[in-house]
Amino acid sequence: MSEKFKRAVLFSGGGTRLMIYLGMFAALEELDMKPDILIASCGGAFAAAVINAFPDNISRKEYLKSEEYFRFVSGTVLTNHKKLSQIGLFSLKKLFDKRNASCIEDVFNRYLVEMPQDLSEVFPSLKNTRFSQEIPTVIIGSEMLFVPKETGLKRNDRKLYRKVILTDFKTAEKINPEQIIITSENLLNSAIEKLSLIKTDISLLESVRISVSDMFYVEPVFLHGKYFAGGAIDLIPIELAQHLAKEIIIEKKQPYSPVEEALVRAVLGFSGNKRLSEIEKFPVNFKINTTNVKQDLKGHYLKKSITWRKFEMVFSFPETYKQFTEDMEMQWQYGFDQTLKSVGGQSPNFQF
């Protein structure tokens, strides 16, 4: 393995946190702490793609305030599983089932949000974006080790998922899968294979589509004859970060909600909150605190709620393009300010 990168930053998920991550990245540059490598999972993967696609913080921010991105957000379509008789009842059952992935869950057909398999259809500006040597990037996804016809079968201790590390060939040469095995009992007894797979033959935008395919939220990806699911398999890949970089910057996140915890347990066979506790014990250089993001950005951040009249789940999105751009600006500034507070120890009024 060649020499480590100096500094890694981890963007660890949340499809509506993209602009927050861009604010974080801009603040790190302002502090003369620009990361040498990005490690991203779930929604953080999209932020990493935007950073790769555009040359500076101004153009990155402008893209996430663009009409192209607004059309994607405002055009979000929920499936019939938004009905409480569907995802609501299913989640309730899993709350009371404490077994670790006792069966093979049907994540192929049970999901909330419609998303095209090919993201270039909705993000033409990102179509030709490649993994960049200027900002080496690693994206986390998972390979599904079963096929649709096996859903519903008992697992019987079978491993159902394998972590996939998606990157370019040069960065891949620095990664030894044997040295990033997660050794906690929480993961060893899960439905996840011990050894990760490195893939360099998947494009950046395809990698993003894989990583955002969270179970029960977005449909898995069928690519190169295999099925892939999201980065929730390792939301904060701290072992990989330590393996690749001398200095690590992570996000201090909220704990999993009871429902989120139950769904991770049902599909992947481990406790998400135990995993967060394990990560807390790892030495890192800086933690950017976003634990109060929903309160701090209330009214300017995606909210999930229930419409009792229709007995279904709804997502709240900005009603106008003007409101959308204002919300995105506030999210960017929040990420910027929280980074200055957590890393720089202060919050001067820098703006782009």
Image (cartoon, grey):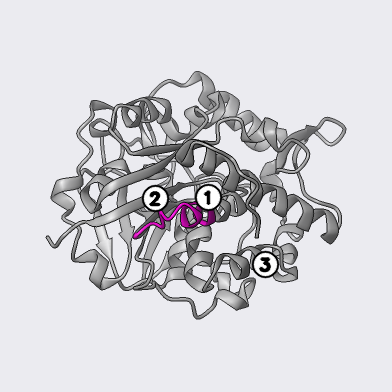
- At 71% across and 48% down in the image, what residue appears? 330
- At 38% across and 32% down in the image, what residue appears? 101
Q: In this view, does 248 lie to the left or right of 196?
A: right
Cα–Cα gap, marks 3 and 1: 15 Å
Is 125 drawn above or below residue 230 in the view shown?
below
Q: Which is nearer the N-term, disc 2 or disc 3? A: 2
Q: Indicate the secondary structure of the residue bearing disc 1.
A: helix
- At 48% across and 45% down in the image, what residue appears? 106
Provide the residue designation for mark 1.
24
Label 3 crowd (10 A; few <14 / some 14-19 / many >=20): some
Cα–Cα gap, marks 2 and 3: 22 Å
Is 288 drawn above or below residue 186 in the view shown?
below
Residue 19: x percent and y percent?
A: 61, 54
Cα–Cα gap, marks 2 and 1: 10 Å
Hey, what amino acid is under mark 1?
A: Met
The region drawn magenta spans 24-36
Q: Indicate the secondary structure of the residue bearing disc 3.
A: helix
Provide the residue designation for mark 3.
62
Residues at marks 2 and 1 touching, judged by CB atoms closer than 8 Å: yes
